[in-house]
Image (tube, rainbow, N blue to C red):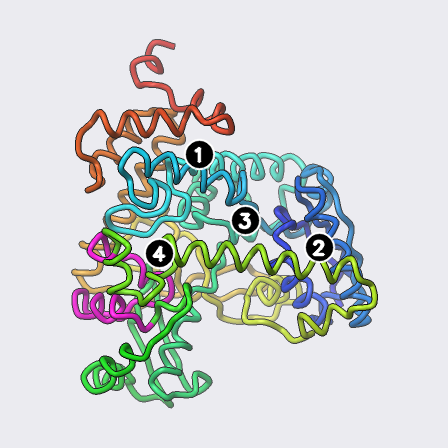
Amino acid sequence: MAQINLAVIGAGSAVWSIQLVADLCVTKSLWGSNVTLMDIDRERLRVIHELATRYARETNADLRFRATTSRAEALKDADFVINAALAGGHQNYEIQREVAEKHGYYRGIDAVDHNMVSDYHVFGGYNQLKLFTDILLDMEKICPDAWLINIANPLFELCTLGHRISRIKIIGLCHGHLGYRELASTLGLDYRDVTFEAPGLNHCIWLTDFRFKGENAYPLIDEWIEKRAEEYWRVWEPDYWETQMSPAAVDMYRRYGLFPIGDTTRSGGWKYHYSLETKKKWYGPLGGFDSELGWQRYLNHLRMRLERLTQIADDPSTPITSEVPPVLSDESVVPVIDSIVNDKEAIYQVNVPNNGAIDGIPHNVVVEVPGVVSAKGVRPLRVSQLPKRVMEMVIKVRIYRMELGLEAFLTGDKDVLLEELTSDPRTRNFEQAEKVLEAIMNLPFNIEMREHYRSKARRLAV
């Protein structure tokens, strides 16, 4: 058993953190380790710490958990750091969304841009980018040899930024690629007999290879679309997250030539997002994850789940393992740590600098590809060439918008933000863009953001 020190930043996300705890407790090769749970929300931190210590006790796992609100204390002697933090929480983003909608931006300027569904994009994302850079700076001082495993969004922007400004070893992990299992299930296939390749950018990955028992399974997708899709959608009652087999996904396949996987199904452009009725057409009765109905369902789920876990934490007679069974989940965070620590070479879906894995993408842009992970580190595997239409109409546009966001953040030039916002189809004129940006920057929790994004003229005059 290898003993490590693991720090979890943003551990108050009890819904996600308890599954991490369960995965650690069933991975005996990591027993003997110390886990520090860090969050600035003391109540949520109390809940997850109580759940973690009891879970370890119930499973007889040799793990020690402690809690702290100090990031520096959590990072001390850390071998691995997991970043799951969302600066300001969902509450602040909902406030920003409401302000943006008052200025004519349906679903807000943090939620959807004209080509790619975005996770707290550059406008409201300043606080998230700043938090991430602060974590990197702290790690460079306190635990410079530690690995940073980032699961926070916007993962694409954060990981690309991190690799460009820091020498900290960073891996981005996301479970979106598991959408291939829903695809397989809908086709009547056992996913355990399926192999796949889905490279691209985080939340923008494409099924370049799909095989069932070694045979090309793309013809099965075509057959399903031709003979079964319409009937499937007639009785389809998806929940907010179920977009893998949506009409939008099939339409994107027809447009781009490859089937989109996971959150990619939400990224086909404004064609699918103009209004709630538009969203319902493409994603079912709730309008998918990004609609006002779907997103509210998601927030309600988080609230009820947290309430349930708090109830269990406050009731010592309720076994936590009855709520979260002690079985390794499909999340790859703990297996990746295990592979590095105990030199168990394995292939995972990872987000790392391209370095030639995908043709046509700069080396310093983080891509999502299969990668070999072991004690030697992470080595991305070269993958199939993405077709020209996917590259030109989706991938390069997504990279361009990422570069705009990072340029604005690194320079503090508000004009770059306005440049991006004026290309939004909801922007009727430049004055509208200026007003919404000013309104968001004037929110009380965005004071630092407002000071950072000053005008170009003022920046040059300093």
Q: Classify mark 4: helix, strand or loop.
A: strand
- Sequence-first disc among 1 and 2: 2
Instruction: Give the mark toward the camera: 1 or 2.
Output: 2
259 w.r.t. 308: above or below: below
Q: Residues within 10 Å of mark 2 (few under 14, many from 20)?
A: many
Q: Which residue is mark 2?
A: 48
- Foreground tag (3 vs 1): 1
Residue 169 badge? 3
Q: Which comes before the other along the chain, label 3 or label 1?
A: 1
Can the viewer see residue 374?
yes
N-term-proximal mark, 4 vs 3? 3
Query: What's the distance in space between the residues labelled 1 and 2, CA to CA?
Result: 27 Å
What amino acid is labelled 4 in the image? Answer: Leu
- What's the distance in space between the residues labelled 4 and 1, CA to CA? 21 Å
Q: Give the amino acid type for the residue marked by disc 1 in the picture.
A: Tyr
Left or right side of 402 for 371? right
Q: Position of residue 81 (x, y in %)?
A: 62, 50
Residue 60: image location, x then y, percent: 82, 71
Residue for point 17% across, 61% down: 388
Residue nearer the viewer, 401 or 76: 401
Q: Is residue 310 left or right of residue 149?
A: right
The three-letter code of the residue at mark 3 reads Lys
Q: Which residues are magenta?
A: 245-272
Residue type pointed to by label 2:
Ile
From the viewer's side, name the closer residue of 355 and 403.
Answer: 403
Could you classify mark 1 by the number of other residues whose Cα lies within 10 Å: few (under 14), some (14-19), or many (20 or more)? Answer: many
